[in-house]
Structure formats: C-alpha cells, structure tokens
Image (cartoon, rainbow, N blue to C red):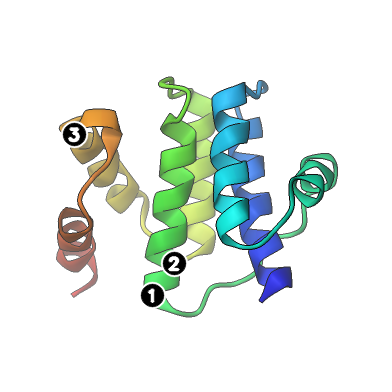
Amino acid sequence: MEKNSKSLLSDLIKMVMADGKINSSEVEFIKKIARRMDISNEEVICLFKNPEPSQPLFNEVERITHFYKLMLVMNVDKETHEKELTALKNFGLKMGIRPIVADQILKKMDNYQDKLIPAEELLKIFKIYYN
C-alpha cells in the first residue's frame, strides 16, 4: 500500500505544481494527508523533488475519493488557474472520470464554505453520470 500511497501523494504534488507555483497552504495540506498515510515529512520532500508515476485505481470509491482530493488541493490556495483545471481533467480522464463530471463538481463547490462538498452531494453528481 505504501507504493500506492506515495503515488497518490505524487498526484497531489503534480496538481499543486500545475500552476507553476507552490504555496505553504498546499504543502501543509499534502503533509496532512501524508501523515494519515504514515508517510514522513522527509518522504514528502523527496516526492516533491521526484514524484512517482500515477498508479491505476480500480475501485470506484478510491477513484472518486482521489479525484476529490485533487480538487481540494487545487482549491487550498483559494485560486483556481486554467493549468490546474487542465491538469485536474487530465487526471480525471486517466481515472475514467468524464470532464463534465469535473465541471459539475467545480460548479457545486462554489456553493459551499471552503468549497467542501458534502459526500452525499458528491455521490449524487457521480450517480447522475454513471448510472
């Protein structure tokens, strides 16, 4: 699982790097997720220098969760850049998530404080497009 965890963190790192700048709130967000995965700060620093390649996620819940984390890290700095949106949609495509789903989630995020969509709302969006 550690290899997969590092790959997932690397995806988040690539997401924050998409706009060409990294700020402290983005780094702290990634470190917080890393701690939950039992990955040290030193390992996170190594991943910033040398991110691991993406690993396929086969479980639907894992894909949705990972995609949501990518969206959250994109919004941590309270700015959304076109390059980040492109990166997000590219990650989504690799995971089998349609761009229209990303668009719907982005629209919905604006309705919530800190852009945190409740899990049940997120699942409703996915159900519309995948059932």
Please give the label number shown on residue 63.
Answer: 2
Percent across and percent down for residue 116 are: 27, 41
Task: Pick the quarter of the image with the C terminus.
Answer: bottom left
Dot 3: few (<14), some (14–19), or many (≥20) neighbours within 10 Å? Answer: few
Front-lying residue, 85 or 3: 3
Front-lying residue, 110 or 6: 6
Q: Distance between the residues labelled 3 and 1?
A: 24 Å
Tell me, yes or no, whether the two marked residues, 3 and 2, touch with CB atoms within 8 Å: no
Q: In which quarter of the image is residue 107?
A: top left
Name the residue that disc number 3 marks. 112
Q: How far apart are marks 2 and 1 (CA)?
A: 5 Å
The image shows a total of numbered marks equal to: 3
In front: label 3 or label 1: 3
Q: Which residue is drawn at 55% across and 58% down?
A: 36
Q: Which amino acid does label 1 sit on?
A: Glu
SS for dot 2? helix
Task: Pick the quarter of the image with the N terminus.
Answer: bottom right
Name the residue that disc number 1 marks. 60
Q: Residue at x 45, y 50 (%)?
A: 69
Q: In this view, does 68 lie above or below 94?
A: above
Q: Which residue is drawn at 73% across and 70% down?
A: 3
Q: In which quarter of the image is residue 106?
A: top left
Q: In which quarter of the image is residue 52?
A: bottom right
Tell me, yes or no, whether the two marked residues, 2 and 1, touch with CB atoms within 8 Å: yes
- Mark 3 and mark 2 lie on one chain; the one further toward the N terminus is 2
- Asked whether the viewer can see residue 54, the reply is no
SS for dot 1? helix
Q: What residue type is labelled 3?
A: Tyr
Q: Which residue is drawn at 28% across and 34% down?
A: 115
Dot 2: few (<14), some (14–19), or many (≥20) neighbours within 10 Å? Answer: some
Please give the label number shown on residue 128.
Answer: none
